C-alpha cells in the first residue's frame, strides 16, 4: 500500500482546500440568513457546520475568508453587525436553488429573491427563515472567533438555538424527525454532493448501554477471515456475550449450515457474512464458532 503524505505548508491554499473538503465529508449544510445594520437580507450556504452542544443548544458554522482575494463574506459582516442568524437545513428538493444562492452576488442583493425561496418572518429574531426548508433554527450569535487573517481562514460563528421550526410532513407517527423522509443533502469535495436517502441510509446498533465483547475477543480464525470485512467484525464485536456450547451446536440442524460445513471454512464464513448483513449477527457468530 503506497501512501502520499502532504505537508499543508508545501501546497497552495486552493490545493489544501481541495484535499480537506474531499476527505472531510459529507458535511451538513447551514443555509444561513442574516441581516446587516441597514436591514438588508442575505442568504448563503456554509458546509463548515455542525452542532456542538445540546444543553444549551449550540450550532457552529464558519464563513471563511475568500482564499484568493482575502475578503470577508457578507454573512460574516452581517452577524458582526446584527448578532442573529436563522440556520435552515437543506434537503434534495431545494438543493439546486440552494446552490444558486451561493453565487457571489453584490452586497444588498437578496438571495431569497434570486434563488426563488419563500422569505418567512422569524418569531424571535430579525433574519427571516427559508419557507421551503424542512427544519430551521432561529439563533442568537454568542461569539465570533476568527481563525486567522489570511485568505482561507475560518471564522467560527457560535450560535444558540432559540426556536426550532419543523415542517410536520417530515415527522414520523411519534412526532420525531424521520430521517428517511428528510432526504437531506451534504457537501463533498469540488462540485459533489451526497444525498441521505434510499440505499445510502443504513443503521448500526449503538453500543451506548451495552458493552460488546470486542473484535479482540473473537477467535483468530474469525479475526483473520479472508471473507469477513472490518464492518462484519465490528458488528460481531458489538455482541455482549458469547453463545453457549448448546446454542452453537443447535445451529448444526440448519440444512444450509450443514452444507457450508461440508464445503469448508470459506463457505461457512460466506454464510456467516450473509447472515450478518441480514441482521442475524448472533446466529452468524454461532456459525463461525462451529469451527473455532
Image (spheres, rainbow, N blue to C red):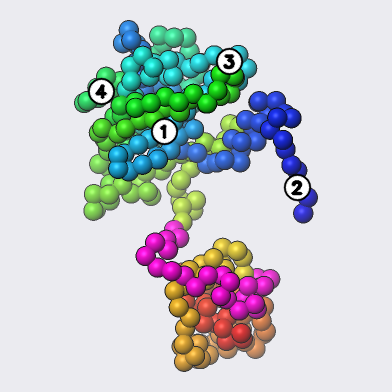
4 vs 1, front mark:
1
Q: Quadrant of residue 273?
A: bottom right
Mark 2 to mark 4 CA distance (whole Å): 49 Å
Task: Rate crowding at label 4 as few (under 14), some (14 to 19) or many (20 or more) other CA atoms within 10 Å.
Answer: some
Q: Residue under circle 4?
A: 125
Of the numbered discs 3 and 2, the one sitting upstream in the chain is: 2
Residue 17: percent from left, percent from top: 62, 30
Tell me if residue 216 comes above or below residue 254 in the rendering: above
Of the numbered discs 3 and 1, the one sitting upstream in the chain is: 1
Residue 155: percent from left, percent from top: 48, 25
Mark 4 to mark 1 CA distance (whole Å): 17 Å
Residue 3's label in the rendered image is 2
Q: Residue under circle 1?
A: 60
Q: Residue under circle 3?
A: 70
What range of the chain is rendered magenta?
Answer: 203-227
Q: Residue at x 45, y 26 (%)?
A: 145
Task: Rate crowding at label 2 as few (under 14), some (14 to 19) or many (20 or more) other CA atoms within 10 Å.
Answer: few
Task: Rate crowding at label 3 as few (under 14), some (14 to 19) or many (20 or more) other CA atoms within 10 Å.
Answer: some
Task: Rate crowding at label 1 as few (under 14), some (14 to 19) or many (20 or more) other CA atoms within 10 Å.
Answer: many
Q: Residue at x 39, y 61 (%)?
A: 208
Tell me if residue 181 comes above or below residue 84 in the rendering: below
Amino acid at each position: 500500500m503506497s501512501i502520499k503524505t502532504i505537508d499543508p505548508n508545501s501546497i497552495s491554499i486552493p490545493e489544501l482546500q481541495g484535499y480537506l473538503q474531499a476527505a472531510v465529508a459529507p458535511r451538513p449544510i447551514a443555509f444561513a440568513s442574516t441581516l446587516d445594520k441597514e436591514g438588508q437580507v442575505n442568504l448563503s450556504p456554509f458546509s463548515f457546520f455542525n452542532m456542538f452542544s445540546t444543553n444549551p443548544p449550540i450550532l457552529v458554522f464558519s464563513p471563511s475568508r475568500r482564499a484568493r482575494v482575502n475578503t470577508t463574506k457578507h454573512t460574516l459582516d452581517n452577524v458582526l453587525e446584527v448578532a442573529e442568524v436563522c440556520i435552515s437545513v437543506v434537503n434534495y428538493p431545494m438543493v439546486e436553488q440552494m446552490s444558486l444562492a451561493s453565487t457571489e452576488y453584490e452586497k444588498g442583493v437578496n438571495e431569497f429573491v434570486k434563488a426563488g425561496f419563500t422569505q418567512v418572518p422569524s418569531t424571535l429574531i430579525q433574519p427571516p427563515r427559508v419557507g421551503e426548508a424542512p427544519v430551521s433554527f432561529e439563533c442568537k450569535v454568542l461569539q465570533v472567533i476568527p481563525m486567522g487573517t489570511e485568505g482561507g481562514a475560518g471564522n467560527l460563528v457560535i450560535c444558540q438555538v432559540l426556536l426550532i421550526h419543523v415542517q410536520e410532513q417530515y415527522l414520523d407517527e411519534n412526532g420525531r424527525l424521520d430521517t428517511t423522509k428528510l432526504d437531506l443533502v451534504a457537501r463533498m469535495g469540488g462540485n459533489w454532493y451526497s444525498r441521505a436517502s434510499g440505499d445510502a441510509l443504513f443503521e448500526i446498533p449503538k453500543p451506548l448501554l451495552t458493552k460488546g465483547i470486542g473484535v479482540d475477543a473473537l477467535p483468530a480464525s474469525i479475526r483473520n477471515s479472508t471473507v469477513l470485512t472490518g464492518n462484519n467484525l465490528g458488528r460481531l464485536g458489538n455482541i455482549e456475550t458469547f453463545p453457549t456450547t448448546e446454542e452453537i451446536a443447535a445451529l448444526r440442524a440448519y440444512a444450509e449450515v450443514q452444507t457450508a460445513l461440508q464445503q469448508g471454512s470459506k463457505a461457512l464464513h460466506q454464510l456467516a457474512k450473509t447472515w450478518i448483513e441480514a441482521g442475524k449477527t448472533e446466529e452468524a457468530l454461532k456459525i463461525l464458532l462451529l469451527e473455532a
